[in-house]
Image (cartoon, grey):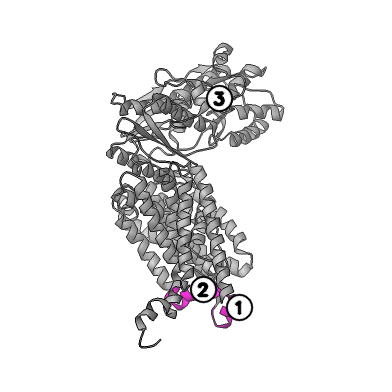
Amino acid sequence: MRHNRFVRLIALLGAFAMVVAACGGDDEGGGDDTFTIGVSNNTVGNGWREQMICAIKAEAKVRGNVDEVVLLNRDTDTAGQISDITSLISQGVDAIILNPGDAEAFNSVIEEAVAQDIVVVVVDNAVTSTAAYLVSNDQAAYGELGARWLFEEMGGTGNVAYMRGIDGVGADTLRDEGFQKALADYPGITISSEVFTDWSPTTGAQQALEIITTQDINGIWTSGIDYSVVQQFDAAGMAYVPIVGADNNAFIGQLLNIAGLSGVAVTNPPSVGGAGAAVAIDILEGKDIDKVTLLTPQALSDSGDLEDIYIDGDFPDGWSSYMEIDPYTHYTADDVIACKGPGE
Amino acid sequence: MTATTPTAERRLGSPEVKRWIQRHGWTVGIWLLLVVLVIWYTTLIPKFGGFQTSTIITGGTSWIFLGVAQAVVVIAGGLDLGVGGMLVLTSVAAAQFMDGQSLGVILILAVLITIAAAVVNGLVGWIITVSKVPDIVVTLGSLFIYQGLALMVLPKVGGGTSGSFRWMFTGSENGIGSNPWPAIVVITIPVVIIAWWMGRTRSGLSLYAVGSDKTAAFLSGVRDAKTKIVAFAVAGAFSALAGFSSVSISGVGNPTTDGGTLTLNSVAAIVLGGVALTGGVGSVLAVVPAAMILFFFNPILSALGVDPNRAQVIQGILIVLVMMVAGVLEWRRSRRS
């Protein structure tokens, strides 16, 4: 009984390891003709990213030759996301789909993955490295299209509230380029306040409430945080001003149903994730794909167009109803809503 | 001890061996657990080589430094919630000032930032001893202050450091590679120095004395105020090392990193490393593998196909289990004696 404590500690550690083991699933890989796809995403709790992940899973499932989607989906900083990508590399995945939290910090880890024969597809936010494939909505066009519509709607004059995304992130920088390009053509428009919503519906709502109750504005440009901004007008009892948003189903619903609200939905489908998965699988299958795939946004403002993509009924607020992206994706909208990957 | 059975006596039953096991059992056990987990991980992934070893050690470096920082303060009877904030502040300061400089300048900056971190955090220790406000309150304040200062130093992701500096912490000029040795050296040297200091010198041992019984320590001539300030200063310096590791991995400073989460990870690391939250007990040598294990959870659970958000729940459950078992062991031992 002399080293009882030591023996028990060892037994405890064994039990500890078994608990960890029991929590895991089975990890057997498939044969040579099937692929494993790793996904790294750095923001959770945002409907857009959630739908992006579901589109990746849906595409991987319908293609039939992906045996597993390894999902590293958590709120983390650059160092954390880099370590997530290195663990995907270590697991020997065939492709990595990545929505990066910075335009430069991931270049080395992307190049390392490519050096280890892993296909890297960056979706949504571009990186400066050319080693990766990029599948993204054309963000500069997104910024410009909405801004032009808004400045026209405002009659070429007045104050605009400029509600951006996350400072320093690729998509935000590109949208700003587009926005500024449009702004240069409308000398009568002034930016009366510029804020970063961090693409959070709650943050955006708070900022919007402050802006509309303290400033005299004639229009709002949002980087996709739209429906919660519209709600603030109602909360504050203010008259609506023209607003630019994205193809969030809730926003489209507001545009269709609220009298006196004018706005434009510029498409920025989260299903770009599905298109990214499609591109990754195509490359793994040996197809020749362009390094950069840009999806051109559409500006939807008349009710016919809006009604076409609106889903009335039980559908998450921050999700886009525009899911099937021709000619890339193979799934149906229902596959994305089901949100099931291979083997699920 | 008789002349007839000296070896058997020495091997198992001698008081020294018993005492050694009592004293170092937890440390040995945690190292063994780390080894078991590594071996297990090698069976989960197709290949385990330099790249895997290097990325795991490199990724775990800042967890280790932050765990050691927390351990020093907790052993001295305190608690520092600010360490995570200090990591963020020092990493963005490094990224802001080191960008584009030569290695010589960068090394001088590294020393200056480390000293500044030690002085500032030592000041926090001083405020605690003078004001008698509990550690948890003062350091909650310092956490927010560091986090806010980080945003003032570097408003958004950016800055950088040199390839050679990144090599020191990651074994590669671009922060990712297959050479684990520089990271191992960079962890080993400060940790061995601090372990030696805490175990062999008067000022280091006074941390244990103050942590286990302030009054007794005072009566035997240890100045508890000075000891606490020193402990907080050491924690500041180790947080700076963690910050350098972080900036070396990502190559940029990230002011929006959540320092609070990093602090809680450091607390988890010392708990798993057998440091008593009541002070006076524990070894930084056990905190090293404990911090490594906590970092290692993510790669392992992802190799098992567990959702990382669920992984946190598992991590939490394991920490509670470890605490419960440690409590039971302690209770059995006190009942026996």
Res. B68 visible in picture: no
Q: Nearer the viewer, residue A216 or A32?
A: A32
Q: Nearer the viewer, mark 2 or mark 3?
A: 2
Q: Dot 2, how many residues are within 10 Å of its Cα: few (below 14), some (14-19), or many (20+)?
A: many
Tell me if residue A261 comes above or below residue B204 in the rendering: above
Tell me if residue B80 comes above or below residue B222 in the rendering: above
**Mark identifier at residue A248:** 3
Is residue B217 in the magenta section?
A: yes
Q: Farthest residue to the front: give it.
A: B4
Residue A120 located left or right of residue B266 = left
The amino acid sitting under disc 2 is Tyr
Tell me if residue B231 comes above or below residue A29 in the rendering: below
Of callouts 1 and 2, the N-terminal one: 2
Position of residue B291 measured from the top left corner of the image (x, y, whole percent): 45, 57
Is residue A270 in the magenta section?
A: no
Q: Output the chain of dot 1.
A: B
Q: Dot 1, how many residues are within 10 Å of its Cα: few (below 14), some (14-19), or many (20+)?
A: few
The amino acid sitting under disc 3 is Asn
Q: Residue drawn at (60%, 60%), measured in percent from left and top?
A: B136
Q: Secondary structure at mark 3?
A: loop
Residue A220 located left or right of residue B65 = right
Start-end of magenta stretch: B198-222
Q: CA distance from mark 1 to mark 3?
A: 64 Å
Position of residue A344 measured from the top left corner of the image (x, y, whole percent): 47, 32
Q: On the image, numbered disc 1 is attached to which residue?
A: B215
Label 1 and label 2 in one chain: yes
**Mark identifier at residue B208:** 2
Q: Main secondary structure of the magenta part?
A: helix
Q: Residue drawn at (42%, 68%), measured in percent from left and top?
A: B194
